[in-house]
Image (cartoon, grey):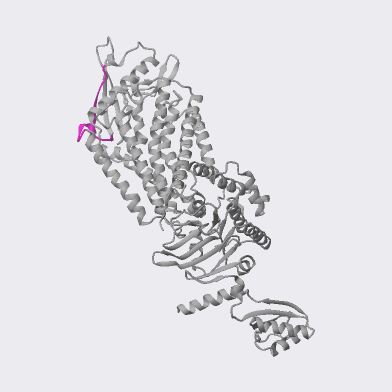
Amino acid sequence: MSTALADDRAVGARPVSRGYRFELVKLLAQWRIRLLVLACWIAPGLFVAGVAQQSTLPSDTLFGRWMHATGWAGPLVMLGFAGTWALPLLTSLVAGDVFASEDRLGTWRHLLVAVRSPRRIFVAKTLASLTVILVLVAGLALSSTAGGLAAVGGRPLVGLDGHRLASADAAVRVLLAWAAALAPTLALAAIGLLGSVALGRSPTGLLLPPLVALGMQVAQMLPLPVAVRLALPGYAFLSWNGLFTSPVQLAPLLIGVTVSLVWALLATALAYLLFLRRDFTNLAYDGAGRRAITLGLLPLAGLTALTVAVVAVSTPSTGSGITRDKVQRSTATAFAHLYRLQTEQLHRPAVTEARLRTTAACTKSDGQGAQRGAGNDWRCVVTWRLPGVPVPGQAVYQLDVTSDGRFVADGDGPKEVNGYFLLRTPAGDAPNPLWQFDGNVELLDTTSKG
Amino acid sequence: MDTRHAVRARAVTKCFGEVVALDAVDLDVTQGRIHGLVGPNGAGKTTLLGLLLGLAVADAGGLEILGMPVGRAFGVPDGVAGFVDGPGLYPSLTARQNLAALARLRGEDAPTAHVEEALDQVGLTDVADDKARGFSLGMRQRLGLAAALLTRPRLLVLDEPANGLDPAGKRHVHGVLARLAADGTAVVLSSHRMDDLEALCSEVTLLATGRVVFSGPPAKLAAEDRELDYRLRTSDQRAARRLAAETAGIRIVDEPGTRQDTDVLVLRALVPALDELVAAVVRSGVAVRELAPVISPLEAAFLALTDQREEAGR
């Protein structure tokens, strides 16, 4: 008989709290989990502190070029790595194995006789794996923050639009960025649970979170419409970028987090249903087979279609979300903030962004073809004005804009503004903030004040 | 409510798809007794044990465990413990940690005393802090038994508990089970080791293709009207051979070419004819040094009954 009919109020069913403790004991007794906990609490701090001491910085990673300037860049660089590699792997090793391990060890019957409630076993296992994942994520965040602050200190952080965030403000946003990344981590963990339940002892179950994460990353690299991009659970691994602009790009962040949480809930619910329908008397059980498709894959595919439709209807953006106006606005804003920073470094008279009246004129493919979309063929001419100087200044940038809205602006002269990577300041040579900078185009057309 | 019976099953039927695993099985297990389940592979023993542990529910028929009717999975009352298909152990935990975690799961906040007692009962105190990963099959069986003992069960259900045990371990486990039964616990165990069942069980149930083909004391099974092969060793084998040849109802089943003065004589006989031969041997002044069935009566009955069913099925 299927255990679906089992009544959870069975005589002597063990409370969830005891099952939760039992599952935690089992998880933490595994050398693999202990090693992960140690690694997550020690390695990021050492890595960030070590990289911050190097002369070459990971400038291809968001905030990597600021690792010499402030310790708050370290946890954000780590978050970038984590979203790509670490978090999918961690969720895979914890949530992706929590049910399958009982299949491998042949302990299901033992556990069921002891607990007497598949429902409570499911809840206990889910909560225990969630706890371990939270401990691992907390370790990554705190360790990298501690490493960055210890090596460089808590100086102001330069945001993605070039404006400076005071240390306290940067701390809050770093915390919020990691909190936002928890949502897609939970979605991957739920997919891990689903794989672990649906595929039994098959290693495919263990591989499911990294495979899904890889699929999501590939999807984010493709020139997809904004609605599809935002409807994928992996988008929240990128949407935290919007926390580091002014105003904060809140809408994509909230949509990304909401989509991820809905995925987490649905995948957990599907894993629960599959688990309760499992026949534990069948020794030859080797995954849910066709039921894994009807109860696992199809509902998630349906959710994706539904989310795309909802996002498409409720947000005004169409196409890639990257337009010439947005590129010009983002480039001009970032340049103005960074010009002010350069002015300070050179001890020139202070000037505000408003008085600079910075504008940017951008073209894609030398003005040929559609002036929208991702590509490394954007070219911008930035113009600004200084008080008392009749001739406006001009600087040229080559932009590489990726499909997710992020761009790298590479200075193309004049040499004294953005053509050289070092500045000769009264205090010695310093990195030139205008030589190369990161920026971000908000894919949606709405922006909330932050 | 029946308080004398730990298990009372009536016409219990269980199917897996089109396969009938149990077909109208009746089973009575009295408290304080050890009850053996015997049967060839696929006879339905593990399915029946699974029902007793609450892992599944019967499709038809009635099942009462410790006086309570069981109508749904995991609906068995407290006091039932055991394992099927081998004990469930976590290799990354030590023996002591396995038991302590299980005891806490069952509601004991400070299970130390019970854990130590259970380890001592099964003779694993010396390896209590070793990881279960390195345990032999026999040690795993004993640890599984200790896990079941933690609950102080009134019904203990064990699937092949003597698997992998060395003679000393087997004696230890038999002692534990006998003590439990003496204290009033009903024990249901399956085994392919007929000598174990004969030594331990006051009653056995023989299953074949999901049906009960015999249920009762092992002695009753052995005393059925069936010839058995016996090994006879005496102080004068030539005289014994001659007397056996002269006794009605005795057949000497030596292999062709066997020397007449070999140490052991194999005879096929019913018990009364054998009694007559022993009396004659003793009267002639020959000492009987050994007289034992070549295979146990229970095993012989098992083979005979299962062979009959196989032949009937052809």
Residue A438 in view here = no
Residue reaching furthest to the front: B1
Residue A124 lies left or right of residue A341; in this view the side is right
Relative to residue A352, is residue B172 depicted above or below?
below
Can you say which quadrant of the picture contains the C terminus of chain A? top left
Q: Residue at x 32, y 38 (%)?
A: A259
Residue reaching furthest to the top: A388
Residue closest to the eye, A443 or A382: A443
Can you say which quadrant of the picture contains the N terminus of chain A? bottom left
Q: Position of residue B167 (x, y in %)?
A: 67, 63
Q: Tell me how many marks there are.
A: 0
* Numbered range of the magenta stretch: A357-375
Q: Quadrant of residue B12?
A: bottom left
Relative to residue B197, is residue B258 depicted above or below?
below
Relative to residue A159, is residue B264 depicted above or below?
below
Residue A365 lies left or right of residue B88; in this view the side is left
Q: Position of residue A423 (x, y in %)?
A: 40, 19
Residue reaching furthest to the right: B285
**Magenta residue check for A200:** no
Residue A442 in view here = yes
Q: Position of residue B74 (x, y in %)?
A: 47, 53
Residue closest to the eye, B10 or A293: B10
